[in-house]
Image: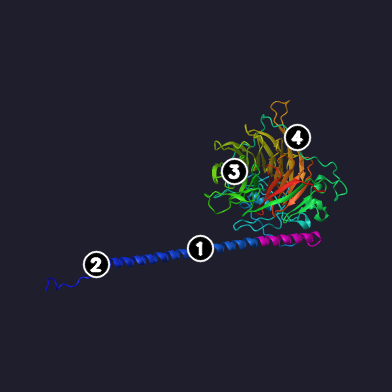
Amino acid sequence: MYPGAHRGMVPSGGPSQRLNELLDQIRQEFETEAQRNVDYEGQITRHIQEIEMIRSKVFALEQQHVQMKAKYEDEIRRLQNELEARGGPSQSSQQHPSHPPPPSIGHGPANLFGGIMAGNAAQGPPNLAPPPQEQPQPQGLPPHGPQGPPGLNPVPGPPQHTPFGGYQGPAMNGAYGQMPQPTASPKRGGPPRGPPGGPATPQQPPAAPYPGSPQVPRPTPPPNQHQHQPMVANQVSLRESNGLSDMDPDQVPEHFKKEGQDWFAIFNPRTRRVLDVDLIHNLPHQSVVCCVRFSLDGRYVATGCNRSAQIFEVESGQQVAHLQDGTLPEDGDLYIRSVCFSPNGAYLATGAEDKVIRVWDIANRSIKHSFTGHEQDIYSLDFARNGRVIASGSGDRTVRLWDLESNTQVLHLQIEDGVTTVAISPDNRFVAAGSLDKSVRVWDINTGQMVVRLDGEVGHKDSVYSVAFAPQGNQLVSGSLDKTIKMWELSAPNRMMPGAPPGGKCIRTFEGHKDFVLSVALTPHGEWVLSGSKDRGVQFWDPVTGIAQLVLTGHKNSVISVAPSPIGGVFATGSGDMRARIWKYERYTGP
């Protein structure tokens, strides 16, 4: 027998083959599990896509429902108004409103904007001196307007009267991102903080000369005021002539009225019709539109609403930018009360309830400057034509000027009551401000001295909510809660009296709105005064005669802001009905 023949037989391959088999088995199990994981991820992805599709369909259905609801409500309102115009029961006699109230703009009774929409302008906040109680303001009546998003407090709706009888469409109203009601919103995160103590409005010192008073080209008044007066046999007062909202549309000649899908215009039949208007774009928002403003080249319009500003292309109506500060907490409201473009169109300044002025780099969607210092809500902003200075007005009773090059505050002007509106003159020399104390003040920007104060017997009888310079800078228009608009002529100093300040006088009062005037402006060449009111109407006025050319309705709530395009022919409106609209106006060529 051979040596070692008694040992057992060793399997071929030995332990390494067994190890390889185990490794292969493990590899197969791993690959199987990996494939299962891929399958599971694919299933999850498909589920997510299905959920997103369902969400999109639900959202589309909701939007369709909202549109259908608005359409039916508009039709119901139109039929109700037509019934009323034909002698049926008035809509106001029915205790159920056709629309839920619009969202409030701000927080509680101390909010200026909310007060305007509620009609309660007589209550002042603890932070601001209450305005004189000369005339009680009309209280809000049955609410109108679309339902606001969750979390916004409802406020009473627009006035009860139904403009334009049976043809009433959605109504309008406007202001400069300004607010009615003499008071400012309380500070966040603590009790209201009163404005700082300090001197009253600066006295008039020897002032720098004011710009001259070149004549502004405007349309020639009609040669024969009685040529087109089918509705009146005798001469009527200017105030009665401008009461377009009280006219019965059925009695207005066809060529003195125009109706769109959800808007209506009446042209004053007591004067020659020279304008035509039409709707270009309807821009829905998620909240109240507090302000509208065009870029200097007229290509874009900016809007301010809750927590964000939007920029739209005027020609297409498409949104091209959405500007929102992502560093802020997402809870609560933060309304953008004012927006304005820099002259070169590269920046957009916004002023809000958080007392911060943000200057956005539009191309980069980023904040280039943040100016702080105001102690209450910022209600109005204006960019100087030189592109370097921004003026701001606040409920803290101050007007402030900010320099973008040095990134600092360069002027601080204190007055006796809340500042609701500011405007810089076209030559960059003066800043004007309207206030809750019924006054309009004008300061020299270089010296900080007040050069004229426009009030008194010929002045407004209630808070001023909007001011605007004429293109030549020699005139100023102001809109007030007293339901009027005033045009002021700013005269150069008397050359015979060295050191005398420039003067100012009221040369015209425009009467015809049925409720608070919230926003005023002049078209680029000064041919027309444009105004928006809580009565939901937008009116065009002849600045030479003071006669209203037309009244336009289309919004379902107060038009808080109106703005003409700097290139002419177009204007925008922003309203408490959560819509902005772009309109065109042109010379009328009909009969």
Residue 15: image tag? 2
Query: Between disc 1 and disc 4, whose residue precedes?
Result: 1
Mark 3 neighbour density, 10 Å: few (under 14) some (14–19) many (20 or more): many
- Going by the image, does 425 lie left or right of 409? right
Residue highlighted by disc 4: 215
Residue highlighted by disc 3: 349
| Majority secondary structure in the magenta region | helix
**Magenta-colored stretch includes residue 496:** no
- Going by the image, does 370 lie left or right of 502? left
Distance in Å between CA atoms under marks 3 and 1? 40 Å
Distance in Å between CA atoms under marks 1 and 2? 49 Å
* Rendered location of residue 568, percent (x, y): 70, 43
Mark 4 neighbour density, 10 Å: few (under 14) some (14–19) many (20 or more): few
Q: State which mark lies toward you, 1 or 2.
A: 2
Query: Between disc 1 and disc 2, whose residue precedes?
Result: 2
Q: Secondary structure at mark 4?
A: loop
Give the quadrant of the N terminus: bottom left
In the image, the segment drawn in magenta is: 67-90
**Magenta-colored stretch includes residue 71:** yes
Query: Between disc 4 and disc 2, whose residue precedes?
Result: 2
Amino acid type for the residue under numbered disc 4: Gln
Query: Between disc 3 and disc 1, whose residue precedes?
Result: 1
Q: Secondary structure at mark 1?
A: helix
